[in-house]
Image (spheres, helix red, strand yellow):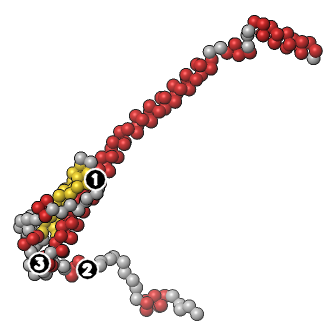
């Protein structure tokens, strides 16, 4: 034990005199290790960016497309709001003059103020064969435009208020035959 302690003390004294430390045998290894770890991290980041960047541009285009479709829907809703606001257009027997060849630009209607979307709508000068007013609504957002064409009926139909379902209920008498009454 004394010899071991003496040997360590002598080694420490010799290291102090010569200026050598315990890490001298690993000189430069830390730098190489740090460079290798940095390279691996940079490759992972570059791979992630290579996969992510094309998806970001596609997602932005899809977002703009959906916003343009919704703007076009808002244009059709604006036509309906405009036509229901005109007293002459609420007739159930005839189509009003204001419904034919109308446009949002001529009327000065801007239904999407305060948003990044825009919409322009026009109606055809003639009715369709079924008596509808045909509306062309073009919505734009982020450089993408989408056009929707809709036929608007000014006269309400009884079928507009109908509700159809494929769900049927059974008569209580039918059910009582198979299930006993609770007591």
The tag earlier along the polypeptide, 3 or 2, is 3
Which secondary structure, mark 2?
Answer: helix
Image quadrant where residue 92 sits: bottom left
Which secondary structure, mark 1?
Answer: loop
Disc sitting over residue 116 in the figure = 1
Query: In screen coordinates, is 102 left or right of 80?
Result: left
Front position among marks 3 and 2: 3
Disc sitting over residue 161 in the figure = 2
Front position among marks 2 and 1: 1
Residue 115 versus residue 61 in the image, above or below: below
The tag earlier along the polypeptide, 2 or 1, is 1
The span from disc 3 to disc 1 (Cα, nearest Å) is: 34 Å
Query: In screen coordinates, is 4 left or right of 27?
Result: right
The tag earlier along the polypeptide, 3 or 1, is 3
Q: Residue at x 53, y 92 (%)?
A: 181
Query: In screen coordinates, is 18 left or right of 145?
Result: right
For label 1, the crowd category at 10 Å Cα-Cα, with few meaning under 14, some 14 to 19 and many 20 or more, is few
Res. 89 in view: yes
Residue 104 percent location from the top left of the image: 15, 62
């Amino acid at each position: 034990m004394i010899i071991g302690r003496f040997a360590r003390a002598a080694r420490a004294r010799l290291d102090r005199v010569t200026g050598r430390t315990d890490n001298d045998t690993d000189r430069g290894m830390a730098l190489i290790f740090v460079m290798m770890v940095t390279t691996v991290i940079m490759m992972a980041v570059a791979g992630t960016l290579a996969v992510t960047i094309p998806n970001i541009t596609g997602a932005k285009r899809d977002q703009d497309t959906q916003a343009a479709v919704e703007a076009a829907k808002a244009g059709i809703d604006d036509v309906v709001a405009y036509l229901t606001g005109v007293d002459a257009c609420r007739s159930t027997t005839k189509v009003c003059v204001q419904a034919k060849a109308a446009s949002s630009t001529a009327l000065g209607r801007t239904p999407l103020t305060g948003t990044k979307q825009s919409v322009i709508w026009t109606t055809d000068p003639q009715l369709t064969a079924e008596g509808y007013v045909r509306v062309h609504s073009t919505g734009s957002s982020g450089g993408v435009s989408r056009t929707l064409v809709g036929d608007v009926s000014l006269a309400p139909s009884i079928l507009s208020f109908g509700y159809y379902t494929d769900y049927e209920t059974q008569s209580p008498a039918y059910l009582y035959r198979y299930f006993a009454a609770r007591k």
